Image (tube, rainbow, N blue to C red):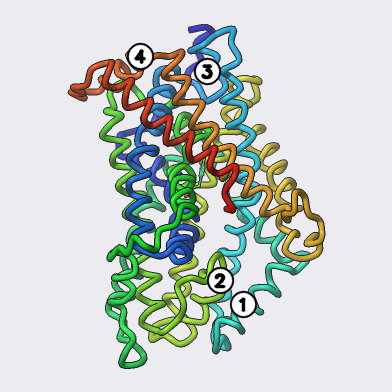
């Protein structure tokens, strides 16, 4: 490996790493996006396919990212330079840093909305929402406002910068260790409340929400839905852009990567399903529609909180849940960018976190305004917000993931991957040939996700 030795911070314990990686994975993708795409694409059958995609795509890419990160003790660009000096593979890492910029800029806009909604819920702002239509109008008035969404976007980015500024152990590790258990408590309270809700009319029941989520009807699963599930596997597990690679680079050789990856995947899936239970039991018990798309959270739920028993406090908890989940994910996005400037450009962490955090805030201004004053600006037929989401979700993450798997097959070699995975006490009994075969199958899945995505509608 080339490059001089750089003293590196390491996680204080395995739990700390799992909390941080889980914090990155569990985010708006689980609580905002997963329930609404499940609602749109037909419920349980979609969920089954999603679980299958997590295993076929998510697990191998996650293992590769952890292994490369830990092996090289570098963040994405430096990692590929170290493993393949003199080649262009470092561009995979560079695309990841760029994806970090783009994703965080619009992610923070939605996170800002959720912050605003904590306060709206707290001060009784949902009280007048007699129907989702009234809630929708209020949400639109907020999201299209020329200044308010910028303020909440700024507050959110300020929090993200503050944590990354404090470093890996004192910032990222400490805050994840506090926030993740809190998050688990909140989601469980909300799910239990949802399950125990009585239907407001005789034919309505929370149970129907559980059926919607867990009893599959495969005739409802469309090709497009399958693609969305596969793309979502990347987003929800923070894969394809080197976030997990970067977190893996703060690991020591003592850790068992396979166990850690399984923990993170189980936690991420459990959160998505629990958020789904909380939301769909409530939606069904109160007679609302599950398939209302991205607005499910901001239009339908506030109207539900307005009428449901205990809705005031549940509303506050729900938006607190979303904000915290978004924060722990956003930290990992800024960390990818910060680590690049620290490692490859010799910046000090404090300066890198502040300067690039502000740059990302500025990049988020146009998409934040694209619901209102900049709504007429369209590129490739999309608003700026949709374009940022589309570029990262549909192209950058799956392409990054595909390149990482191909890199492992062609250049780094499955044998090196296995060698890294066997450290930390893992008795991995698998031959090099079998590992190669599994990687090829996984590469095919990722390639299908990417190529079919080029032609699909979504
Ligand atoms: N995994 C996060 C979520 O589900 O909301 C989003 C995300 C975070 C994607 C970090 C990519 C990333 F690097």
Q: Secondary structure at mark 3?
A: helix
Q: What residue does disc 3 label?
A: 80
Q: What residue does disc 4 label?
A: 416
Q: Quadrant of residue 151?
A: bottom right
Q: Which mark is residue 56?
A: none
In the drawing, does residue 223 fall left or right of residue 141? left
Q: What residue does disc 1 label?
A: 136
Kindly indicate whether the residue at mark 1 contacts the one at mark 2 (C-beta within 8 angstroms). Answer: yes
The CA distance from mark 3 to mark 2 is: 41 Å
Vertical order, 244 against 369 (above or below): above
The CA distance from mark 2 to mark 4 is: 47 Å
Q: Residue at x 41, y 32 (%)?
A: 61
Q: Pointer 3: residues within 10 angstroms few (<14), some, or many (20+)?
A: many
Q: Nearer the viewer, residue 17 or 135?
A: 135
In the drawing, does residue 194 fall left or right of residue 79? left
What is the x, y in percent for residue 389?
Answer: 62, 49
Q: Nearer the viewer, residue 67 or 296?
A: 296
Q: Quadrant of residue 419?
A: top left
The CA distance from mark 1 to mark 4 is: 53 Å
């Amino acid at each position: 490996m080339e490059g001089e030795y750089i003293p590196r911070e390491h996680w204080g314990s395995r739990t700390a790493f799992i909390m941080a990686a889980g914090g990155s994975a569990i985010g708006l993708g689980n609580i905002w996006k997963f329930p609404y795409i499940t609602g749109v694409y037909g419920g349980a059958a979609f969920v089954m396919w999603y679980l299958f995609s997590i295993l076929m795509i998510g697990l191998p890419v996650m293992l590769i990212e952890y292994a490369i990160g830990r092996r090289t003790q570098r963040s994405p660009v430096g990692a590929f330079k170290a493993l393949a000096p003199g080649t262009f593979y470092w561009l995979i890492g560079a695309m990841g840093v760029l994806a970090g910029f783009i994703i965080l800029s619009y992610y923070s806009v939605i996170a800002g909305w959720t912050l605003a909604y904590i306060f709206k819920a707290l001060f009784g702002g949902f009280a007048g929402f007699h129907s989702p239509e009234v809630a929708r109008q209020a949400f639109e008035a907020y999201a299209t406002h020329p200044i308010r969404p910028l303020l909440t976007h700024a507050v959110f980015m300020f929090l993200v910068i503050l944590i990354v500024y404090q470093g890996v152990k004192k910032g990222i590790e400490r805050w994840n260790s506090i926030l993740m258990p809190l998050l688990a408590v909140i989601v469980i309270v909300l799910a239990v409340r949802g399950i125990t809700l009585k239907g407001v009319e005789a034919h309505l029941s929370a149970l129907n929400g559980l059926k919607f989520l867990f009893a599959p009807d495969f005739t409802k699963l469309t090709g497009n839905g399958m693609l969305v599930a596969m793309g979502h596997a990347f987003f929800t597990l923070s894969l394809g852009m080197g976030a997990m690679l970067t977190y893996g680079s703060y690991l020591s050789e003592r850790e068992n990567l396979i166990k850690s990856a399984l923990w993170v995947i189980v936690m991420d899936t459990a959160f998505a399903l629990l958020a789904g239970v909380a939301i769909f039991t409530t939606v069904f018990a109160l007679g609302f529609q599950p398939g209302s798309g991205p607005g499910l959270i901001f239009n339908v739920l506030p109207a539900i909180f307005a009428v449901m028993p205990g809705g005031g406090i549940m509303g506050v908890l729900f938006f607190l849940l979303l904000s915290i989940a978004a924060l722990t994910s956003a930290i990992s996005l800024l960390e990818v960018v910060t680590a690049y400037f620290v490692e490859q450009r010799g910046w000090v962490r404090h300066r890198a976190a502040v300067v690039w955090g502000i740059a990302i805030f500025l990049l988020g201004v146009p998409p934040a305004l694209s619901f209102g004053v900049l709504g007429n600006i369209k590129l490739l037929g999309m608003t700026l917000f949709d374009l940022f989401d589309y570029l990262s979700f549909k192209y950058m993450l799956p392409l990054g993931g595909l390149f990482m798997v191909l890199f492992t097959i062609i250049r780094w070699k499955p044998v090196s991957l296995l060698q890294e995975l066997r450290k930390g006490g893992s008795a991995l009994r698998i031959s090099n040939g079998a590992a190669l075969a599994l990687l090829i199958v996984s590469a095919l899945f990722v390639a299908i996700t990417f190529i079919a995505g080029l032609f699909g509608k979504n």
